[in-house]
């Protein structure tokens, strides 16, 4: 390892992967504004926060946690492109969780 390698590490650090707790917070933050789906959640994070990443495994673990807590609900949506049905996720509108916007 050279000093240049260390310098380069701090100039262009590797991405930081969200853990499950941060992923839960991120998913809720997105869903407050709009319904989404798994791939879009990952793409939004990479676009809005380029130094952060979210793995499929952690995302789906966070989604499962939120679903078990009745905080989110999944439904089928017909996408404009090709009219294909796809799974969508939104905040649950029943119980103590309510959409605020």
Image (tube, helix red, strand yellow):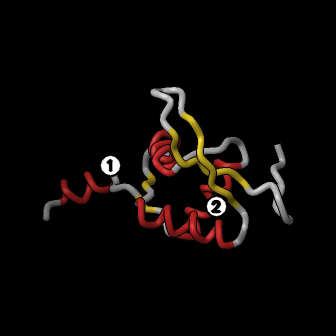
Q: Quadrant of the N terminus?
A: bottom left
Is residue 68 found left or right of 42 in the rendered image?
A: right
Residue with the mark numbered 2: 25
Is 65 drawn above or below residue 51 in the view shown? Answer: below
Q: Position of residue 98 (x, y in %)?
A: 83, 55
User: In front: 63, or 16?
Assistant: 63
User: Front-most of 70 and 77?
Assistant: 77
Q: What residue do we see at 68% from left, 59% from top?
A: 72
Q: Quadrant of residue 68?
A: bottom right
Which residue occupies 14% across, 61% down?
A: 2
Q: Residue at x 28, y 56 (%)?
A: 9
Q: Residues within 10 Å of mark 2 (few under 14, many from 20)?
A: few
Residue pointed to by mark 1: 12
Left of 14 or right of it: where is 32?
right
| Callout 2: SS | helix
Query: Which quarter of the rendered picture does the C terminus lie within?
Result: top right
């Amino acid at each position: 390892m050279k000093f240049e390698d260390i310098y380069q590490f701090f100039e262009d650090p590797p991405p930081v992967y969200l853990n499950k707790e941060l992923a839960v917070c991120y998913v809720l933050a997105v869903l407050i504004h709009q319904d989404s789906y798994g791939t879009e959640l990952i793409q939004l994070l990479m676009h809005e926060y380029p130094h952060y990443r979210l793995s499929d495994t952690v995302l789906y673990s966070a989604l499962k946690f939120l679903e078990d807590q009745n905080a989110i609900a999944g439904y089928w949506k017909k996408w404009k492109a090709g009219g294909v049905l796809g799974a969508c996720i939104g905040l649950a509108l029943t119980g103590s969780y309510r959409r605020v916007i």
